[in-house]
Amino acid sequence: MSLVRRAVPEDADEVLRLRQVMIDSVFSSDSSVSSTKWHEQSLPSLRGRLADPDGAFVAFVVDHPERPGALAALVAGTIEYRIGRAGNPHGRVGHVFSVATDPDVRRRGYARACMEELLGWFREQGVPQVDLNASAEAEPLYASLGFVRKPDPSMRLQL
C-alpha cells in the first residue's frame, strides 16, 4: 500500500501550510512572502479545486507519521492548454509546483513518492510534457526522474 494519497478538501489547511514551507525555503530572504495572511483568502478556492476529481488541478500528499491530521509532504500539479506544436499536437502541458516536505521528516523519500504519483497522473491524462521550476536543493531529485534544465526566456507581469 502506498503512503501517497490524493489530497481532499479537508487537507486544504495543511496543503497551504506545506506550500508556505516551500515558499519560505525558496524565498527565505524575502520577508514579504513569509506572511500567511493570504491563507484564509486562498482556502475556499483550494478546497473547491481539491473537491473536483475531474479538474486540471491535483495534489498528492503523505500523512505525517508522528502528527495525526498533519501532512508530511505535498506535490501539486496542474494541466494547462497551449496551442499544439510538434511533439505535443494537443497542447497539454503539465506543471509541477509546491513540492514540499516538512523539515522534520525530510530524506525519507516522501517527495519522490508524491512526484512519481503526480507523473503517473499526468501520463493517465495524456500529458506529454511536464515543466517545473527547481531549486538547487531539489534539482537532483528532478534530474533522477528525467527532468532536464532548459533555457528559460520567461518573463512576468504582476497585474
Image (cartoon, rainbow, N blue to C red):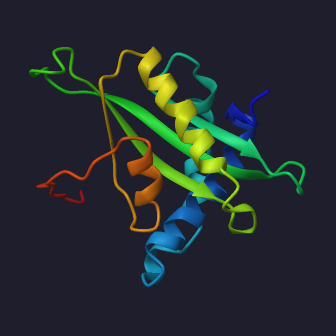
Name above or below for residue 74 compared with residue 78. below
Residue 16, image x, y percentages: 62, 54
Residue positioned 89% across, 56% down in the render: 66
Q: Residue at x 11, y 55 (%)?
A: 153
**Which residue does the image show at 58% across and 56% down from the upper left?**
100
Residue 7 found in image quarter: top right
Query: Is 10 placed left or right of 92 in the picture?
Result: right
The answer to which quarter of the image holds residue 116 is: top right
Left or right: 82 with respect to 31?
left
Residue 53 drawn at (x, y percent) = 58, 19
Q: Identify which residue, 122 or 98, lies in the foreground.
A: 122
Q: Residue at x 65, y 50 (%)?
A: 109
The quarter holding residue 2 reads top right
Place of residue 17 in the rendered image (x, y in percent of width and height, measured from the top left): 66, 59
Residue 6 versus residue 152 in the image, above or below: above
- Residue closest to the eye, 159 or 114: 114
Q: Where the N terminus falls, by quadrant?
A: top right
The reply to whether residue 86 is visible in this rendering is: yes
Where residue 104 appears, as percent x and y from the top left, is 75, 68
- Please say if 83 is above or below 47: above
